[in-house]
Structures are given as C-alpha cells and as structure tokens.
Amino acid sequence: MIYSLQGILAEKESSGAVVVCNGVGYYVFCSANTLSNLPELGKEVFLYTVFSVKENAVELDGFSTEEERDLFKLLCTVNGVGPKLAFSILSTYIPDRLILLIGSSDSTALTSCPGVGSRIAQRIVVELKDKVVGLNIGEGTSIVSTKSSSSIGEALEALVSLGFSNSEASKALSSLDTGMSSEELITNALRLLASRK
C-alpha cells in the first residue's frame, strides 16, 4: 500500500497530477480541491494517497489533506459510488462543507455534484450520516473530532450547547461561508435559525 507521496510536481492536469519521486513519475488522480492547493510546477509536493487495484487498471488517488482522503474512502463504500463520482463530489464541496451536508441530511445539495442523481444522493446521506458524525476512521480518530479545532467545529459545538439539534445546527452552517471565523459562523447561523422559526 502507498500511504503518501512526496516529490516534485512535474505536471498538473484537469483530473490529476504527476509527482516525480526518486526519478519515477507517478500519475495521481485528484479532486479540483486538491489540485487548487498544489504548488507551482517544479516545487515539492506532499499528497496522502489511496492505492487501488481493479480488474483492468491500477489507480493512485491523491489528496492534500487526511480529511479529504478519509471522506473519499467513505464515499467509495456507498453502493453506486466509485472513485470518479467520489472525486466529483469532493471537487464540488470541500470536506468541512460535505460533512455538514451529509450530517444535516441535505441530499438535495449533493445532487448539484456532476453525476450525482437524487437516488445516489439519498443513499450517501442514509449510509454515511452516522459515520461522518461519529465513526472512527483512519488512525482511530473521528472525522468530526479532527475538525473540532476548526471554526466550523467550534460553531457546531456552540450551537448544540445552546440547545439546537446537531441536524439543525449543521443545516444552518452548511449554507454559510466556511472561511468565516467561529464567532461570525455562530452569529449568522443564529440569524438563520431564528428566521426559520
């Protein structure tokens, strides 16, 4: 198993990149999110990877963060979701936003991802909702606990402590800009939640 790659970024394409490690160039499939985080050509790059062997192909998938890699692996456990569709979803939503959408059962938003119909979107929500809010993955850490120090994690905890359900809080936060500070997220989420009552 190839856990990660560290080398020189030699090429960047719409669906992936070439990383040269010790004279060997590895083609790594990536989401648009990871591609946007890559450095300039010729610079050193580090990617977490998922290595898979299929009947007619060997594939190496790369991710800029462990969270994105873990979400990719979770998405691929859903019946009908393969690597191509998982990358489509991760290219549309960053990990924080995707976790919130699944946690709040917002299958409609998932249908905005190319290739994702309503049936697949509902299946993703049903099969992964409990997993993204509590299942230990990777090295025994929860995908939510890895985010607890982020603005979204802090805002979610604050809203739940104020008496809102995890689903209500997640839904409100999922419609906000994830670049906001935790204070801004809480303030704006409270406005949204108040307007819905």
Image (cartoon, grey):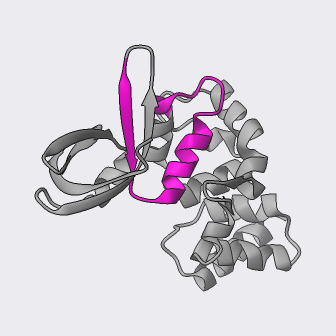
Q: Which residues are magenta?
A: 57-85
Residue 182 in picture, x, y percent from top left: 60, 81
**Residue at image coords 65%, 39%:** 108
Q: Is residue 55 left or right of residue 99?
A: left
Q: Nearer the viewer, residue 190 or 102?
A: 102
Q: Is residue 146 left or right of residue 8?
A: right
Marks counted in the figure total 0
Residue 139 lies in quadrant: bottom right
Residue 55 lies in quadrant: top left
Above or below, 55 against 59 in this view is above
Task: Report if residue 13 is visible in the image.
Answer: no
Residue 179 in picture, x, y percent from top left: 48, 72
Residue 144 in picture, x, y percent from top left: 68, 63
Above or below, 73 against 95 in this view is above
Which image quadrant: the C terminus? bottom right
**Residue at image coords 77%, 68%:** 193
Q: Is residue 26 left or right of residue 11?
A: right
Judge whether residue 77 is colored magenta.
Answer: yes
Which image quadrant: the N terminus? top left
- In the image as oriented, which residue stretches furthest toward the bottom? 183
**Residue at image coords 70%, 52%:** 132
**Residue at image coords 64%, 33%:** 77
Residue 54 in picture, x, y percent from top left: 45, 20
Judge whether residue 52 is colored magenta.
Answer: no
Task: Report if residue 171 is visible in the image.
Answer: yes
Q: Nearer the viewer, residue 6 or 158?
A: 6
